[in-house]
Amino acid sequence: DAIVSGDEGALTRAVENLVENAIAAGTGSVIVKSGIEGEWAYVAVADRGPGLDPDLLRSSPGLGLAIAARVAESHGGRLETVPRVGGGSVVILFLAPKGADPSSTPVAIRLGAL
């Protein structure tokens, strides 16, 4: 269980953007998983689409991924993407759990197995 502190509306929209993008870009089912990885809470969204260029996380101000990245950063977190084992992408919203001040960088690569 991971409890984070932040703007509920902004965080909800960020996760919605990740799911909507996975549905639009992917083929088949979309997997959403949350948990704790190291010192970080996360929500990971996996699809079986064509893959994702990590540069899209920072581009196009109106793009859902760029918005989610800005929300993550405004909450002291980050948005990462890794290739999904077997094809597709996993986009991960990392946030510091409530009361924590993680000094490590989140490790996203293990979540590619979703």
Image (tube, grey):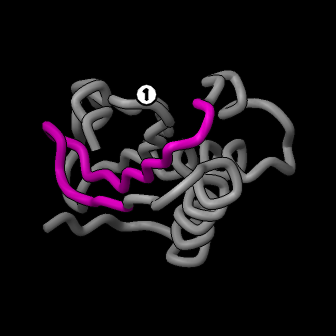
Q: Please name the residue shown 69% across and 22% down the image.
A: 55
Which quarter shows the N terminus? bottom left
Residue 36 on the magenta span: yes
Left or right: residue 47 compared with residue 94? right
The amino acid pointed to by label 1 is: Val
In x, y percent, where is residue 111? 27, 37
> What quarter of the picture does the C terminus occupy?
top left
- Report the residue at 61% width, 24% height from top: 54
The percent coordinates of residue 67 (x first, y second) are 71, 50
Q: Give the dominant element type of the magenta stretch: helix, strand or loop.
A: strand
Q: Tell me the element at label 1.
A: strand
The magenta segment is 32-51
Left or right, 9 with respect to 107, comes to: right
Is residue 41 depicted above or below 52 in this figure? below
Q: On the image, numbered disc 1 is attached to which residue? A: 82
Which residue is rendered at x = 30% and y = 59% of the image?
A: 33
